[in-house]
Amino acid sequence: MSKLQSEFEVECPCCQGKLVIDANLRRVVRHMEPPSGDRPELDDAQRILAQEAARREALFQQSVAAERTRGDALARRFEEALKQAQQEPITKPTRDFDLD
């Protein structure tokens, strides 16, 4: 596309893309995205998908194991709290009314 005399090109400070601005219209007329170097190759797609599937499976197995031991951990915490409650002396709770 040919560039008019009223158009000028500016580099975007955020994404380093090219902006073509028309001075008469006072707006951006074109935006060209910067080349991205971190795109994966199509040949690596199968490997990337396999890695992501393995990562998801590992996370799932970890959550299953945590869920299996969760009941034991909660029971142990309950027993500790019960022992602590039995060792503390029984006191009458203070009410706001009693503080006056």
Image (cartoon, rainbow, N blue to C red):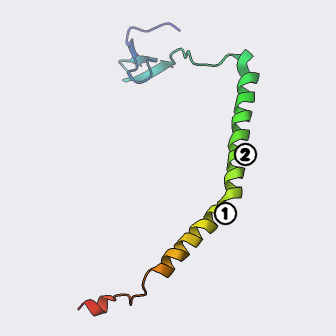
Closer-to-camera residue (95/76): 76
- Using the image, tell me which numbered label, if any, was put on residue 61: 2
Disc 1 crowd, CA 10 A, few/some/many (<14, 14-19, 20+): few
- Using the image, tell me which numbered label, if any, was put on residue 54: none
Disc 2 crowd, CA 10 A, few/some/many (<14, 14-19, 20+): few
Q: Quadrant of residue 88?
A: bottom left
Foreground mark, 1 or 2, reads 1
Query: Relative to residue 58, is residue 46 depicted above or below?
Result: above
Instruction: Using the numbered discs, state the Cα–Cα distance from disc 1 to disc 2 in whole angstroms.
Output: 18 Å
Q: Give whichever of discs 1 and 2 has the lower sequence position.
A: 2
- Using the image, tell me which numbered label, if any, was put on residue 72: 1
Closer-to-camera residue (40/36): 40
Closer-to-camera residue (67/26): 67
Q: Quadrant of the C terminus?
A: bottom left
Q: Residue at x 56, y 15 (%)?
A: 37
* Side of 4 where 94 appears, left or right: left
Q: Quadrant of residue 69?
A: bottom right
Residue 74, percent from left and from top: 61, 65
Query: Relative to residue 68, is residue 21 depicted above or below?
Result: above
Closer-to-camera residue (42/66): 66
